[in-house]
Image (cartoon, helix red, strand yellow):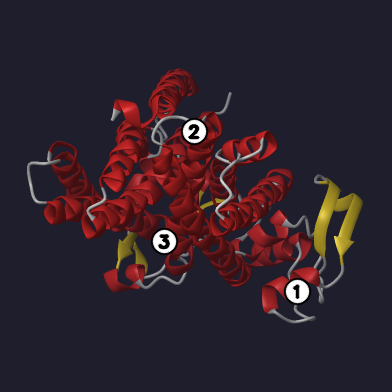
Amino acid sequence: MDALILARWQFAITTVYHFFFVPLTLGLSIFLAITETIYVRTGNEMYKRMTKFWGHLFVINFAIGVATGIVQEFQFGMNWSEYSRFVGDIFGAPLAIEALLAFFLESTFLGIWIFGWDKISKKLHAATIWAVAIGSNISAFWILVANSWMQEPVGFAIENGRAVMTDFFALLTNAHLWVQFPHVITGGMATAAFFVLGISAFHIFRKSEDQEVYINSFKIASVYGFIATVLVTLIGHNQMVHMIQTQPMKVAAAEALWDTENPASLSIFTIGDEQNRKDIFAIRIPRLLSILAYNSLDGEIKGINQLQDEYEVKYGPGDYVPSVIMSYWMFRMMVGAGTIMLLVAIYALFLTIKSKFELKPWARLLIFYSIALPFIANSTGWILAELGRQPWIVQGVLKTEQAVSKSAGWGEVLSSLILFTLLYAVLMVADVFLLKKYAVAGTSKH
């Protein structure tokens, strides 16, 4: 059994577990800041009850997210020591800033926010939740500074077999960062919006006490969610356009595009022969991929076979094709979930505009189960982002097989993989149990 494969599985599983909680934290912190600001401006106690209710759920999710995130950095030293040695000079700076500045900012002010109700002024208390929201999203920014460098390395030089930072400002202006960061933030906003919409719809249909809170939560979340889903779609399009220039193999794999096309067709459904790199069966729409990529009827999209030949010349012999079947279906799950989210967001906004909150059973079920959609989109999007650039752990600079710890035996990695997977599963169950318990209980418990 290969320690590299096990180490990759371990990092993938723990990352997906962790990222399950992060977007909800990012988006819900902003939502809470908005609702408490409305409370301060209007003096309406209903908005205070609303903020406390959603705030309780936010704190549960935040705590579990912190617990699952701690293991992430440990793995750099355990399973990926060669990677840490190679990129430590660059990776260390944004991660240190994230921990010392952003995380302490959000955690400190979250404590004040939790225990400061009726102890400090309303305006000051509202300011603390804005600090939490800003801190949470700044934290995401610094993590993405590091990840964007892996996707599109800039501002560095290779010295004595290590990547050494030569321009810190280049990391902050990395073009990949400025398509990735907005996509993650708006994705978090959409996650929070659908979370609020689903739980509010449940209580509206159930005719729980304090209907005013749930109806107004639904109204705010419908606007918040519509804006977020439109933005995440537009920004995601820009991200794809950028990837065509910087990570064309990822785009080709996501489309199962074996050979270069100009104009390029978009795959609706493809069954491919990955070993021989050809289609077995495919339904494609002519020119549509070029239209999406270039806003033009014409435009070249490089194919997997041509890129493989190009990379062999540039980087030497090797297999530079990621898992096409995984990339293809992760992309479609992400886009599919996002498309349904947009339709549900439009429907929820329509209900708000028309003030129709007597939800029929099918509408309540649709909106309630839509809570899962952004989690699916977030997870599959991240899998595509990381899997689609293989065999590189740092695009064009360091291969994944070169980054694994030389001393990591398969038995040690397997045992820690099992341990972390089970531990995270327990934390996931605990999170869902607590969220369900307090969400169902409603405002009466807050």
Q: How far, Cα to Cα, is label 3 from label 2? A: 44 Å
Answer with mark 2 or mark 1, whichever residue precedes in sequence.
2
Point out which mark residue 203 bears. 2
In the picture, measured across the screen, residue 126 lies left or right of residue 183, that is: left
Q: Residues within 10 Å of mark 3 (few under 14, many from 20)?
A: many
Asked if the residue at tag 1 contacts the one at tag 2, i.e. Cβ–Cβ closer than 8 Å, the answer is no
Under mark 3, the amino acid is Trp
Q: Which residue is mark 1?
A: 290
Query: Farthest residue in the right direction?
Result: 281
| Residue 94 visible in image | no
Task: Find numbered disc 1 in the image and state the secondary structure of the residue it sits on.
Answer: helix
Query: For the residues marked 1 and 3, what is the alpha-carbon distance in whole angstroms?
Result: 27 Å
Kindly tell me whether residue 292 is visible in this rendering. Answer: yes
Q: Which residue is mark 3?
A: 149
Question: Where's the N terminus, which quadrant?
Answer: top right
Q: Earlier in the sequence, mark 1 or mark 3?
A: 3
Residue type marked 1: Ser
Rendering coords of residue 224 (x, y %): 46, 57
Q: CA distance from mark 2 to mark 1?
A: 45 Å
Q: Residue at x 62, y 60 (%)?
A: 316
Q: Is residue 230 left or right of residue 284?
A: left
